[in-house]
Image: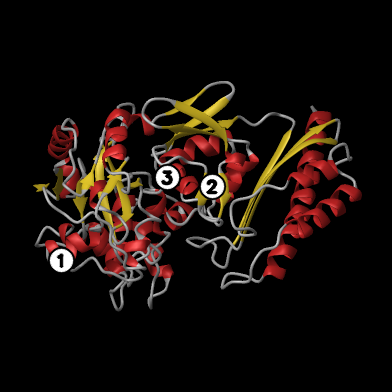
Amino acid sequence: MIRFLINNDFVELNEARADLTLLQFIREHRKKTGTKEGCAAGDCGACTVVLVEPTSPDNPKKLNYRTVNSCITLMSAVHGKQLLFVEHLSDGKHLHPVQQALVEHHGSQCGFCTPGFIMSMFALYHSNTQPNRDEVLHALSGNLCRCTGYRPIIDATLAVCKQTPHDQFSAREDETLAALMSLSNERPSGTANIHTPTTREALKALVKKYPQAQLVAGSTDLSLQFTQQLKEVQTLISVTHVDTLKQCTKNKHSLTIGAAVPLSDAAPLLLNAFPQAAELVTRFASLPIRNQATIGGNVANASPIGDMPPLLLALNATLHLDNGEKVRTLPISEFFTGYRKTVLANDEWISAIELPLKQPNQTLAAYKISKRFEDDISAVCAVFNVTLENGKVEAIRSGFGGVAAMPSTCTSLESVLKGKQFSSNECLNLGKQVLFDAFTPIDDVRASAAYRKTVLANLWHRFWLESQTANNIETRVVQHA
């Protein structure tokens, strides 16, 4: 049984297809058609809805409003949460403040994308942060406008989010929190086709009982098999309620992130430890995707164009692989074996990702090249992590996506450049040549092989130039001090 709230109503789901998406449930089971289907891939935002859940105990906010793409969100994701879609916002007599703001700023024309924008605005409205323009752009990311243009939509969002949240939802906050707390105290049992274990022992038992069942966390990749390829699946095992997969810890040596932690929750920890990774973390799809997607899932699917594996390779991350009885650790450099293939055993799952903390003599940079700035797949992804001793290359860890059949590193980059003066033109030119020759990428709709090889070499040039500038600034600061 999966229990959740739809607005103020308790809902119990005892039976459902394993591949039933939230969008299908809303439109076909609940007959609410305000939420639209556009791309069925989490790319356009027309299907955006909001999931509400209690915040962590140390957070002064009582409830967290989180946007998700309902077209690729499975029903296992809603247990213990409140589901809100566009029909819930008006009180029947008056438009909600975010709806009224969109009217007043002329932000809606054909209206097909409007419900998604409204729900993203609504979630930001309840963040009570009085956001600036950049924060508004991040909140609206993943919502594509078909005809109006973004300026009036952004203006409407800025205007309404200057206000303190005051609507029927804020008025019922204590009541909603109590209802959600009562649901969260009940362990989910899932349905006959959707299994939702809460402990590693229960997960182990389900993996043994259903050896062909796929494990799912955020479903942002897996659901494309259902919505795009029209595949059917009989049984799924959701890991989103397993407490041990949702824990994050940090010590003086490393940062460990649970495999089922949504990327938007992991992002503050990641960026605090590795601010140079912002290009990958903030451009990972869009906010509704990051609210569901997990680093564990991004690694486990072994996509050659995943954004996180290149970063993890460059950071020399260690994967924690669990089978319910014991946990083994493995360098991520030994995890991928081919296109969508890994060393993960049939009875194992990724439980955590451990990242060694950056050292003072390391220079780190991450680059993502894609046709769109946000919500797009990498044509080339490159991460460089260079350790210097007295200005000379001591070690180089690297990670690349989009240039091979699997996320890859380039060991020859270190072997050729080790001991070289990093600021020298020799180091620049040798690095470019090594990277140009290192991979044999393919031609596809995102980029040609020749383009990828050239871009990869040029990214080393960019990294080298930016590193010289950064090191010169640091030297001047030290001398001035």
Percent from the top left, x then y, of residue 4? 16, 45
User: Which residue is under mark 1?
Assistant: 28
Q: As drawn, is 201 to the left or to the right of 277?
A: left
Task: Report the residue that reaches farthest toward the top.
Answer: 252
| Residue 54 figure quarter | top left
Q: Which mark is residue 294?
A: 3
The image quadrant that residue 405 belongs to is bottom right
- What kind of element bears circle 3? loop
Please say if 234 is above or below 424. below
x 72%, y 56%: residue: 459
Residue 304: x and y in percent read 56, 56
Q: Along the line of sight, which residue is nearer the eye, 337 or 4?
A: 337
Give the residue number, with chain letter if any, for mark 2: 308
Cα distance between the residues tagged 3 and 2: 10 Å
Is there any visible trace of residue 325 in the rendered image? yes
| Above/below status of 396 relative to 289 | above
Q: Amino acid at mark 2?
A: Met
Q: Quadrant of residue 369?
A: bottom right
Q: Residue at x 36, y 68 (%)?
A: 228
Dot 1 or dot 2: first in sequence order is 1
Q: Are marks 1 and 2 in contact (CB under 8 Å)?
A: no
